[in-house]
Image: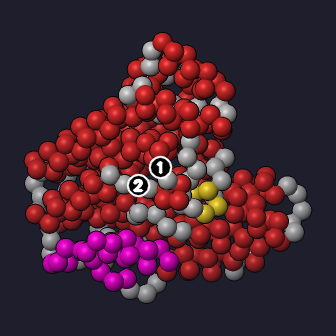
Amino acid sequence: MRSIPDVGGTVSPRPGEIATSVDRLLTEFLDAEAASLTSLDPGLEVMVTVARQMVLGGGKRLRSAFAFWGWRGAVGPRRAATSVLPALGALELLHTCALVHDDVMDASATRRGLPTAHRAAAGRHIALGLPGDPDEFGRSTAILIGDLCMVWADRLASRADLPAATLIAARRGYDRMRLEAIAGQFLDLLGDGALESSSIGRALRVARLKTASYTVARPLIYGAVLGGAAVDGPLTRAYTRYGMAVGEAFQLRDDLLGVYGDPRVTGKPVGEDLARGKSTVLLELARAMATGAEADELRRLLARRAPEDLPRLAALLTRTGAAAELDRMISERVACAFAAVDDAPLDPATREALGHLIAAASQRES
């Protein structure tokens, strides 16, 4: 691959610079990987093209940003990031794997305003006039695309120019992150069918495993260990406090956007989780706070799961006070995150960047 413009030297990266460097790295990596795969058989072009679109089709690159600042907090402001960048970019391939599989499980039609992998693959099936059922082809192809992105993530991470002992130490946390994300996804899949009754506590547990750990806490610690920090030292302990608070705020904001967000901004239809009866923190708060006629109406609307009821259901979540309580919970976690940053052994630029990332995760509109 060609050399990637460096970030993280003596001057703090400008907003968006980390994402730009990661995108350039991913583009060059995927160009080479696509050429290698299609040389095996031209038919692989269908899968590779959709996979490439899923990786490069937008996204905030939050996980690689958190990992970068985790690394930066460990090494200080004077280390160039060239050697570590492939390990950071690998997180975006892992994230694509999770998104593609999640969209198959949820039967989602769009992601970031574009067709999901299974829908895009089904469209290619129709356009090429292939035999068989396009939807089944799309779902099967998407599963393989998710698996492919998992393999790509490992291949890219292995290109980091770091000591073997450092990579092995970081890999332990990386693997733990993947296990927790899978556990959280399965608990999310169980939903109301879980052996224990749904509750706010259980919904928060899913949010911690599926989102908080995987989006913020583990990438931060992964970056720190790549920078030579102790796995259980003062820096990684501070990152854990910060990461879980910011990660939970991220997921709670996602709950609100899923009901009240603008689809033109979020890139996904409003009310998908409600239509599926998914046990979110917002919904569990409403169940706990609704009384009398409101509780009866909530049960009735959730049982019907009719698309035309979504506006009434959203209004009901507001009337119960659940949306306001969720806002309060987000603010509480933001305050905890800022306290963790203030207490952490960080240089001023890293402390400032992590403060900006709190806002990016908790006040976003998409």
Q: Earlier in the sequence, mark 2 or mark 1?
A: 1
Q: Is residue 204 left or right of residue 47?
A: left
Q: Residue at x 43, y 87 (%)?
A: 2
Q: Position of residue 319 (x, y in %)?
A: 43, 28
Image colouring = secondary structure
Tell me the magenta residue range: 4-27
Q: Residue at x 66, y 53 (%)?
A: 109
Q: Position of residue 82 (x, y in %)?
A: 31, 77
Q: Residue at x 45, y 15 (%)?
A: 291
Identity, as a three-letter code, of the amino acid under mark 2: Glu
Q: Position of residue 235 (x, y in %)?
A: 16, 51
**Residue 21 on the magenta segment:** yes
Identity, as a three-letter code, of the amino acid under mark 1: Gly
Disc 1 residue crowd, few under 14, some 14–19, many 20+, Cα 10 Å: many
SS category of the residue bearing label 2: loop
Query: Farthest right residue?
Result: 131
On screen, residue 67 above or below 43: above
* Disc 2 target residue: 365
Q: Residue at x 15, y 75 (%)?
A: 78
Quadrant of residue 207 in the image?
top left
Residues at circles 2 and 1 in contact by the CB criterion of under 8 Å: yes
Query: Farthest top residue?
Result: 292
Quadrant of residue 125 in the image?
bottom right
**Residue 68 on the magenta segment:** no
* Disc 1 target residue: 261
Q: Can you see residue 359?
A: yes
Q: Can you see residue 74?
A: no
Q: Nearer the viewer, residue 254 or 145?
A: 254
On screen, residue 48 above or below 113: below
